Image (cartoon, rainbow, N blue to C red):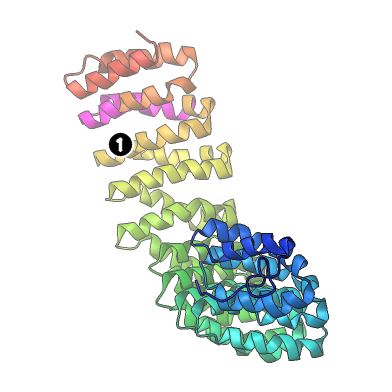
Amino acid sequence: MAGAAGPGTGSGAAGGDGDDSLYPIAVLIDELRNEDVQLRLNSIKKLSTIALALGVERTRTELLPFLTDTIYDEDEVLLALAEQLGNFTGLVGGPDFAHCLLDSVRLLAVEACVSIAQLLSQDDLEVLVMPTLRQAAEDKSWRVRYMVADKFSELQKAVGPKITQNDLIPAFQNLLKDCEAEVRAAAAHKVKELCENLPIEGRETIIMNQVLPYIKELVSDTNQHVKSALASVIMGLSTILGKENTIEHLLPLFLAQLKDECPEVRLNIISNLDCVNEVIGIRQLSQSLLPAIVELAEDAKWRVRLAIIEYMPLLAGQLGVEFFDEKLNSLCMAWLVDHVYAIREAATNNLMKLVQKFGTEWAQNTIVPKVLVMANDPNYLHRMTTLFCINVLSEACGQEITTKQMLPIVLKMAGDQVANVRFNVAKSLQKIGPILDTDALQEEVKPVLQKLGQDEDMDVKYFAQEAISVLALA
């Protein structure tokens, strides 16, 4: 840390003139220079005590310059200092001297601007606050520019619409194309709030002409955090810009983000589809974004297919059961017979989540019949998938559907020619056994497991005997 003399440490300070009342201040000042971050933090939290003891004039002329010269520090310390200075107006003599605070620490000037701007008239804002803000928005330190981006919504509300239009919008444009990804990401996070906080009159024109061109650039940014930040808020612009602008200008951006290689970008778009649905309607949505989702669902790269499966319950909840059945159900069933095991496994778990969302009646009518048909598939891997589906669906569907619709199929598959299918029958019976009533267990399950327990295949015999033991059917 810099060795600037602190208030209370030069001539006429504690020890210099024998004034013991200032001794605690000297200790705090020393702590501000200490190598221990925690000590510095503790001292910063007591800054108001120092300021009160020094009085408003010495706070302005000694303490603030000391802070300016001395504290270039870890972010944690700077943040604590920012919180203190935001409440310092009264300690420097009130609003008339508020500008003193803006000269203290460059990084913290932005934080202080928010608190101070709320106290000043528009004329005073222009003279006292805006020069500092303009400098901060173009500061050589990316951390200062980051702070401007991070506090943008608060600054916008504090300075009002006129200054926002004249000064903050151009500054925001620069932040959106900043050379540092952290700054662009922080600004991207604020896009929706900035647009929402603009005056309704003229808002659309400002967004379309002065904000949207910069947003379009960020959609293809080289940094995934920037793209993800934008994707988390961009859908919200549809409610601000309305149907026609959304269809013409925003949908192409959403489509590009849906196909982004970064999973977080895709998820942020899919998880906010309901915003767009409200504005453009389900028909337009199905004609525009859903084909892109289907395309991803059938992508040659299995990891891309896997990502879409994981988003499917979320998508289903937003679009509703009717739309899901019409447009997406067939996809979910197709995944069950995918050639990659990880996809079949994820598709099975997906079915359980869909049943939890849409209910057992939907499952009984829509899902279970299609799953059970696969029990007769020539491919033994697909027959095994039937069993895996029954394992997860039985719990979601309950006793009646499991006993009447699923159990007979499992029992029938005990005679399968492939040993892998037979031992999975034993495992499935063990899994669904606790859901069944005693009669079904004793009269239907037990004889089949006893027969499998005598199977010529060692694995089948092992899992059958294990099921008999776990279900207490011995």
Does 53 sit above or below residue 95? above
Residue 464 in which image quadrant: top left
Question: At 51% across and 75% down in the image, what residue appears?
Answer: 2
At which x and y percent is residue 191? 60, 76
Q: Which residues are magenta?
A: 404-424
Question: At 51% across and 45% down in the image, what residue appears?
Answer: 354
Does 124 sit above or below residue 9? below
Q: Is residue 55 left or right of residue 245?
A: right
Task: Out of 139 and 63, give the one closest to the viewer.
Answer: 63
Asked if residue 243 shows in the view, the reply is no
At which x and y percent is residue 74? 51, 66
Question: At 47% across and 55% down in the image, what residue appears?
Answer: 311
For residue 416: magenta? yes
> In this figure, which residue is indicated by the disc labeled 1?
384
Question: At 29% across and 13% down in the image, what residue appears?
Answer: 450
Task: Out of 59 and 410, give the one closest to the viewer.
Answer: 59
